[in-house]
Amino acid sequence: MPDNTPYMIAAYIIVAVILVGYAVLLYRRTLKP
Amino acid sequence: MKILKTGRWITVSGLALLAAVYVRALAFTPVERTQGMAQKIFYIHLPSAIWAEGAMIFVGVASIFFLFLKDARLDRFAEASAEVGLVFCTLVLTTGPIWGKPIWGTWWTWDARLTLTLLLFLMYVGYVLLRGAVTDPGLRARYAAVLGICGMSLVPFVHLSVYMFRTLHPQPIVIKPSAPSLPGEMLTTFLFSFVVFSILYVGFVTQRYALALLRERAEPHA
């Protein structure tokens, strides 16, 4: 079995950062529309 | 504003459930033998891809109805769905190459599926830029609706590209005419992830819709 765990970890971290980041961005934008 | 609070709650619930998806995918789903841990990227890549395409379909359908009915709610929904679709399309174009590097040996190739997904991304970018560039609300809504319909017409080509062209991208294993060819545990994890990404789409769109409404109220002449 190939060891490509770092790629998987990177993908999961990036997805979490983008989704949480967009949620925070939306929250801030709705505070000051 | 009730719709804004509802959107926030749905989003927070979606993000909490996303953590549960991570736990299930990483700790309670078997590792695929040939691809190893990189296969687990599939559980976040495919739901993102479905909503990157689905959001543009909603933009197009709302745009068609807007051109006939001139209902501002449809325009607001299309605006919201396009921005959220752009976020999901970004996820697809990020997770895809990260999977491609260890499995294909390259981050990117000008394969039909990849290239058409990039075009879909550019369509989203164009849509968002157009909305920001046109100041007249009536013109903006009409121009955006036309572009939204063009974007929707691209989606079938993105989805069917793996059948229409010789591509490097894997053939569909879940969304296809026959039954999904995925072991039960992996299919359950995928379906759970898809539900959570759907909740996030609804939460984001609801909040973005509320933001458009707030902006209209703040600038009644804009």
Image (cartoon, rainbow, N blue to C red):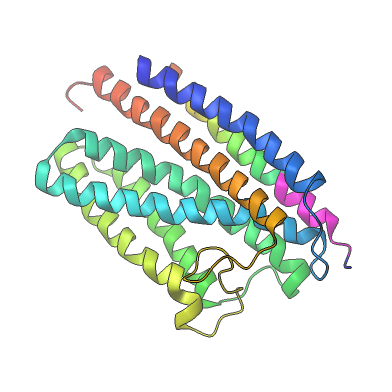
Q: In this picture, is B194 found above or below B165?
A: above
Is residue B30 visible in the rendered structure shown here? yes
**Residue sitting at x 77%, y 60%:** B38
* Segment colored magenta: A3-12
The percent position of residue B50, horizontal first and vertical second, equals: 49, 55
The percent position of residue B9, horizontal first and vertical second, equals: 50, 22
Q: In this picture, is B150 found above or below B111?
A: above
The percent position of residue B139, horizontal first and vertical second, equals: 16, 44
Locate the N terminus of chain B by quadrant.
Answer: top left
Q: Main secondary structure of the magenta part?
A: helix
**Residue sitting at x 61%, y 55%:** B45
Q: How many marks?
A: 0
Q: Quadrant of residue B17?
A: top right
**Residue sitting at x 48%, y 80%:** B163
Q: Quadrant of residue B34?
A: bottom right
Question: Is residue B215 highlighted in magenta?
Answer: no
Q: Quadrant of residue B74?
A: top left
The answer to which of B159 and B72 lies nearer the viewer is: B159
**Left or right: where B214 falls relative to B136:** right
The answer to which of B209 and B187 lies nearer the viewer is: B187
Q: In this picture, is B167 found above or below B215?
A: below
Question: Is residue A4 highlighted in magenta?
Answer: yes
Is residue B125 visible in the rendered structure shown here? no
The percent position of residue B70, horizontal first and vertical second, equals: 12, 40
